[in-house]
């Protein structure tokens, strides 16, 4: 039964990660078709808010035992939800300046940022193995970001936005594992997406009015909303408690190869051997940081 539970949890997290992995590719594809990022991200979160609100309403109507959220819990989820909106915002801005295959590598700097956050929040949990993993992740990033390739120049604006996306993503991952765990999956996802929607409105403001159209709302909003603000938060909230943060983080790293390969298929971004080597090193770092040494049974 435990094995089945772990398998289901891994499937949930894996599908959620793959869902996130294809987002940037299609946002960049939409950009190339003339659709602005402000309109796309507004449509994404508007659809997410609508669908999650309806799901939460129907869940409450058919269940009398669902726990109610305290005010402070709602506020914390809304606050951390802003990190969800900022992650999308900074990530979509970064890929306007750099390839998607490099944007996702910058986003996944959350690997060592998570170790750094853990150092400040619970210093006793930071082990030499985790520090080594963080260093490995940085080394892999250098290769995956084509730093040693003389015919390629990284745009500093795109790099800054990518790193800001990683900072926001680190806060989002923390919230997914620590905030409002007493609530249902739908309720937690709803409040976080509410927070993301609010920060999107504040950040993009007037640009949304210039770029939003019915085509953006229904064509791209439904696609991006489903794969970006509905499916992944629900699957992560269901999967992580079943398999734990450590194994969950390893499975979630599927986002990197999925994003890189989808960019190759849809956008024709060329991926070099050094990049794949860097990605392999980053994935190794994720496993090193999160895999725990199994205890020997007492004889």
Image (cartoon, grey):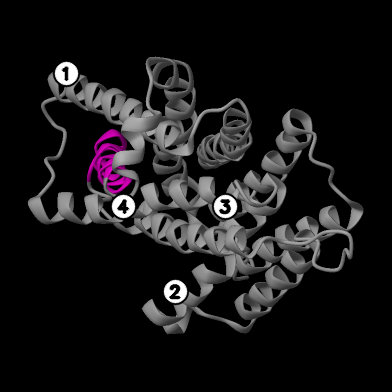
By secondary structure, the bulk of the magenta-drawn segment is best described as: helix
In screen coordinates, is 26 left or right of 64?
Answer: right
Give how far apart the Cα atoms at labels 1 and 4 are.
30 Å
Q: Tell whether label 4 touches label 1 (CB within 8 Å).
A: no
**Depth order, front residue of 95/190:** 95
Residue range (magenta)? 183-201
Q: Compute the Cα span from label 4 to label 3.
A: 18 Å
Q: Closer to the N terminus: mark 1 or mark 2? A: 1
Give the Cα distance between marks 4 and 2: 18 Å
Name the residue carrying label 1: 62
Residue in the picture at 60% in, 46% down: 96
Q: Earlier in the sequence, mark 4 or mark 3?
A: 4
What's the CA distance linking mark 1 and mark 2?
A: 39 Å
- The residue tagged 4 is 82
Q: Which circle marks residue 94 in the picture?
A: 3
Circle 2 residue: 117
CA neighbours of label 3 inside 10 A, class few (<14), some (14 to 19), many (20+): many
- Identified at 88% across, 51% down, the residue is 272
Q: Report which quarter residue 200 is drawn in.
A: top left
Label 4 neighbourhood size at 10 Å, few (<14), some (14-19), many (20+)?
many
- Residue at x-position 35% and y-position 56%: 175
Image quarter (top left, top right, bottom left or bottom right) of the C terminus: bottom right
Q: Which mark is residue 253?
A: none
Q: Nearer the viewer, mark 3 or mark 1?
A: 3
């Amino acid at each position: 039964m435990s094995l089945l539970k772990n398998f289901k949890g891994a499937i949930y997290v894996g599908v959620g990660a793959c869902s996130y992995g294809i987002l940037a590719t299609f946002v960049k594809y939409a950009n190339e078709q003339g659709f602005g990022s402000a309109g796309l991200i507004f449509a994404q979160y508007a659809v997410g808010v609508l669908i999650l609100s309806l799901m939460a309403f129907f869940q409450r109507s058919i269940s009398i035992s669902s726990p109610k959220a305290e005010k402070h819990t709602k506020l914390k989820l809304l606050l951390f939800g802003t990190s969800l909106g900022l992650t999308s915002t900074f990530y979509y801005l970064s890929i306007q300046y750099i390839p998607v295959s490099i944007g996702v590598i910058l986003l996944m700097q959350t690997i060592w940022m998570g170790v750094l956050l853990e150092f400040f929040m619970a210093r006793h949990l930071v082990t030499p193995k985790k520090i080594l993993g963080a260093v490995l992740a940085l080394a892999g990033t250098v290769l995956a970001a084509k730093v040693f390739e003389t015919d390629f120049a990284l745009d500093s604006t795109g790099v800054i936005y990518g790193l800001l996306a990683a900072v926001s993503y680190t806060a989002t991952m923390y919230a997914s594992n620590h905030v409002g765990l007493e609530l249902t999956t739908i309720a937690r996802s709803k409040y976080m997406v509410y927070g993301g929607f609010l920060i999107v409105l504040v950040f993009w403001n007037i640009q949304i009015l210039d770029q939003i159209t019915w085509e953006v709302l229904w064509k791209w909003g439904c696609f991006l909303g489903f794969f970006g603000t509905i499916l992944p938060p629900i699957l992560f909230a269901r999967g992580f408690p079943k398999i734990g943060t450590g194994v969950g983080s390893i499975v979630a790293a599927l986002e990197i190869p999925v994003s890189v390969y989808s960019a190759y298929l849809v956008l024709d971004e060329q991926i070099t051997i050094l990049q794949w080597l860097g990605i392999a090193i980053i994935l190794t770092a994720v496993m090193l940081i999160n895999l725990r040494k199994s205890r020997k049974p007492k004889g």
